[in-house]
Image (tube, rainbow, N blue to C red):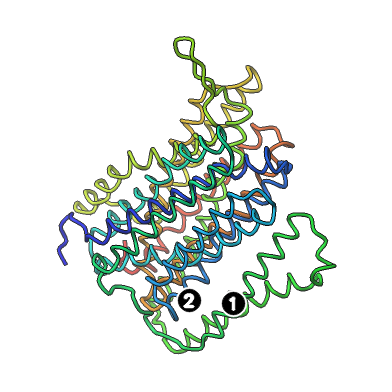
Amino acid sequence: MSIHHNHPKGLFLLFFVEMWERFSYYGMRALLMLYMVKYLMFSTEKSAQVYGWYTGLVYLTPLLGGYIADRYLGQRKAIVIGGTLMALGHFAMAFPPIPFFFGAMILLIMGNGFFKPNISTVVGSLYEENDPRRDAGFTIFYMGINLGAMFSPLVCSTLGEKVGWHWGFGAAGVGMVIGLAMYLWANKSMLGDKMMRPAKPKTDYWVPVTLVTLMVGMLVVTALQINGYDIKGLLPNWFYSLAAVLVMIGLVYAYASNSSKSTLTIIEKQRLAVIFIMVFFSIFFWSAFEQAGSSLTLFADRETNRWISLFGWRWEVPAGYFQSLNPFFIVVLAPFFSKMWISLGETNREPSSPIKFAIGLGLLAIGFVVMIAAAASYQKYGPVSMLWLVGAYLFHTLGELCLSPVGLSLVTKLAPLQFGSLMMGVWFLSSVAAGFVGGFFAGNYDTVNHMTFYMIPTATGLGAALLLLLITPKLRKWMHGVH
């Protein structure tokens, strides 16, 4: 395969499919917190709890979806299943009753589990092991993610906040259908037979069926609990805990049974250890970053002057629009980062992946320093300029570009072939913990001084960056030449 800067044509199909999938996800996410607070009349604490439950579990199921694709379905079939479930979930959000709301959450969580780890794994399969274009290819793919994320809050927030909430959710469903149709139309011609079949197929289908059933059961009971139902009359109290334990035992059994048939070398074990360590540090990044859809959206709604006046014409910018800032900056800056990594690599000056992670954590912390200043200004003068949020999102985006596409690329470089999608699912585990932590943290938004509130992610981001810098020499040794 050529090592010039041109990329495989399959990358551009996956670019557009992921663009539409992210259009649907971020369009729905831009409305979710405001919809719960203003339409469903949930408290800020309950809304943040649901938001954290959703953004956490939406990254837990990729562990299950990655395993099933690796062993039973192949990545390409899993992508179709995931896209279909997510389209159904988005359209379910267009119906007002509460059961549709929580049912939609479950469909979206399960669909994302099949879709997200597998499309990233297919992107990695387009490149040979030492192809220098890999990081740049993932950065381009990441730009597609954010192109969809940039436009979706503009479309869905305009419809949701100005016309009707369910019009916004319906638009998100249309985006998912477009992405799925595009994939079904062109995947065979542009991807060939890559990832059509599992690396080491298994036929004991009772394992995935049992795991999926338990996971759905756990999600249903969680939804009932969050909505205030007394589940004693529905299911015994021990069911929820038992289901959670059985899911984890089932996953451990499934992984162990596969590992026993494929002995890992010392080098492979050390590379896997690096993935787990980087997953741990990613938790600090994403738990702070996920404030975009919760506390930062509330800051935009309540503490930001969003009125634009021009020649006597006045218009209030929807609060959800601010979630377009992060993907807008990524679309603008991603080509620069892609070229920068290639140029530095050609001169042997490219920083290692752990160093890029540390830089990303530091930039995230700077973004929250901006929010500390914005909160101070609000306390003194009242509603603040929209430019404060613009500055915070700019630094968050710079940090994200140093961490997220680099992390996706690192997993595909370090993971053994037979565990490709599984380890991509492990990578997304950082966002599971981050979703729960970030949701719990955002739930205190109404009870904590907002300057103090934003000091916490600032301190944790800087602390994690310094710790990562200290252990980088050991990590580079365990990576065995992988950059």
Question: Where does the image place residue 102, in percent across and percent down from the top left?
Answer: 65, 56
Who comes first in sequence, dot 1 or dot 2?
2
Q: Alpha-carbon neighbours of circle 1 within 10 Å: few (<14), some, or many (≥20)?
A: many
Question: Where does the image place residue 253, in percent across and percent down from the top left?
Answer: 57, 83
Name the side, left or right, on which 13 lies relative to 403.
Answer: left
How packed is label 2: few (under 14 Cα within 10 Å), some, or many (20 or more)?
many
Q: Is mark 1 on a helix, strand or loop?
A: helix
The residue beneath circle 2 is 68
Provide the residue designation for mark 1: 211
Residue 25 higher or lower than 330, as above or below: below
Residue 295 location in percent, x, y?
A: 61, 39
Total marks shown come to 2
306 or 275: nearer the viewer: 306
From this view, report whether residue 341 is shown above or below residue 390.
Answer: below
- Give the secondary structure at mark 2: helix
Q: Are marks 1 and 2 in contact (CB under 8 Å)?
A: yes
Position of 316 relative to 13 (above/below): above
Q: Which of 100 and 12 is in front in this view?
A: 100
439 and 151: which one is in front? Answer: 151
Q: Left or right of 228: which side holds 57? A: left
Residue at image location 47% in from the left, 54% down from the top: 468
* Alpha carbon separation for disc pair 1 and 2: 10 Å
Quadrant (top left, top right, bottom left, bottom right) of the C terminus: bottom left
Q: Residue at x 55, y 32 (%)?
A: 162
Spot the residue most to the top. 311
Would you place residue 458 above or below residue 231 in this image? Answer: above
Q: Which amino acid, by three-letter code, is at mark 1? A: Leu
Give the amino acid at mark 2: Ile
Task: Point out the image quarter for the N terminus.
Answer: bottom left
The image position of residue 445, as x and y in percent, is: 68, 38
Q: Which residue is drawn at 74% across and 42% down?
A: 43
